[in-house]
Image (tube, grey):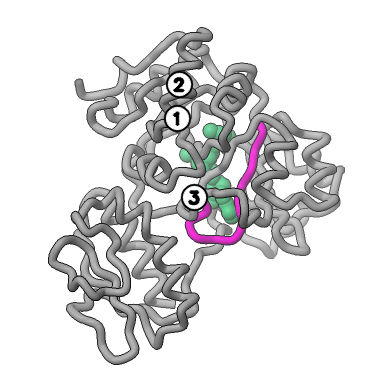
Amino acid sequence: MIDASNAIRCADDAAIAAAAEALREGDLVAFPTETVYGLGADATNERAVARIFEAKGRPHFNPLIVHVPGLAEAERIAVLDDRAHRLARRFWPGALTLVLPRRDDAGLSKLVSAGLDTVAVRVPAHPLAEKLLTAVGRPIAAPSANRSGAVSPTRAVHVAGSLPSPEAGGPAIILDSGPCAIGLESTVVDLSGADAALLRPGGIAVEEIEAEIGALAGGGDDDTAPKSPGMMSRHYAPATPLRLDAAAAGPGEALVGFGPTAPADAAANLSPTGDLLEAAANLFEILHRLDAEAHASIAVMPVPYEGLGLAINDRLERAARR
Ligand code: TXA
Ligand code: MG
């Protein structure tokens, strides 16, 4: 099987129940929204979120949108201010994603925010997506359900043609409910700072959003801010300097190992068995923990440049360069 066509299921109640169960078990499920098909994973399961990057073949970790069935569930994972409430009342459910401060007690994966202290939240306006999210009872991370660099899928067959089969790390189930109504990703607005900013134009017009909360940086009349889609997302970097390709820890350094050959007294090991999926799932957790311990520096042993190792190395290199 070269693609995921064998995973397509007509989205009846039995398929939705099976998909909810698969998500709770940490598997991937592709599902329709009103914008595009999403590749979903349990946003509270670090390993499940790492699977998304593996299946998409993304060479870097960017933060993902977390989908919830309604405002109440959004409030459980993020902090909504007045602006957020105004936009949520007007556009949710719908093609608007809000970047908001994360709640510490939400149990969200760190990888889902790529280590940032914010989270992107959306309530999709699709009856099937809503049913699925309600059935799972957990927030679901979902980027568009295509290989990295390919066009976003608006039909189940696009998903199947783009992603690997279930056996090869692709979605266990692709819920088919026909073409997406909008066919374009959601508009992403950053409300985590004092000035609201447009991060990605999309399914809801910027003018409509500005009519609710005023001018957006990067929006309509603002030619100073960058407008490229997704390019404004900040990157998490630890305050502690990072040294890569380390063979051993120097004085005052915390050693981060990878694989079975790492010293047993290393401060952390991304994956003792050398499993890149596990390493991706542990990466931000380990960086945050060691950063808080205030070492002189963090020394990281080599991670292979293959599969998820590309995204792991990209992240480490950015953190080291800074
Ligand atoms: O329509 C959509 O939004 C689709 C469907 C499946 O819901 N989803 C989607 O997700 O396009 P994704 O993960 O591919 O889009 C994420 C966008 C990127 O531009 C990313 O940089 C931005 O949202 N983003 C996510 N979390 C962020 C954060 N914490 N801070 C800044 N930008 C963030
Ligand atoms: Mg995409």
Tell me residue 270's x, y (percent): 29, 61
Gap between marks 3 and 1 measured at Cα = 14 Å
Q: Taking 213 as reference, is 164 above or below it?
A: above
Q: Taking 61 as reference, is 151 above or below it?
A: above
Nearest the eye: 145 or 243: 243
Q: Which residue is mark 3?
A: 109
Q: Quadrant of the C terminus?
A: bottom left
Q: Taking 22 as reference, is 287 above or below it?
A: below
Q: Secondary structure at mark 2?
A: helix
Q: Which residue is mark 1?
A: 23
Q: Secondary structure at mark 3?
A: loop
Asked if the beta carbon under badge 2 is closer than 8 A to the nearest atom of ligand 1, the reply is: no
Asked if the beta carbon under badge 1 is closer than 8 A to the nearest atom of ligand 1, the reply is: no
Residue name at image x 18 percent, y 69 percent? 262
Q: Residues within 10 Å of mark 3 (few under 14, many from 20)?
A: many
Residues rendered magenta in the picture: 112-123
Tell me residue 62's x, y (percent): 47, 52
Q: Which residue is mark 2?
A: 19
Gap between marks 3 and 2 measured at Cα = 20 Å
Amino acid beneath label 2: Ala
Question: Horizontally, is 152 left or right of 138 in the view?
Answer: left
Q: Is residue 66 magenta?
A: no
Does label 3 or label 1 sit earlier along the sequence?
A: 1
Quadrant field for ligand 1: top right
Question: Horizontally, is 255 left or right of 155 in the view?
Answer: left
Q: Is residue 117 visible?
A: yes
Does label 3 or label 2 sit earlier along the sequence?
A: 2
Amino acid beneath label 1: Leu
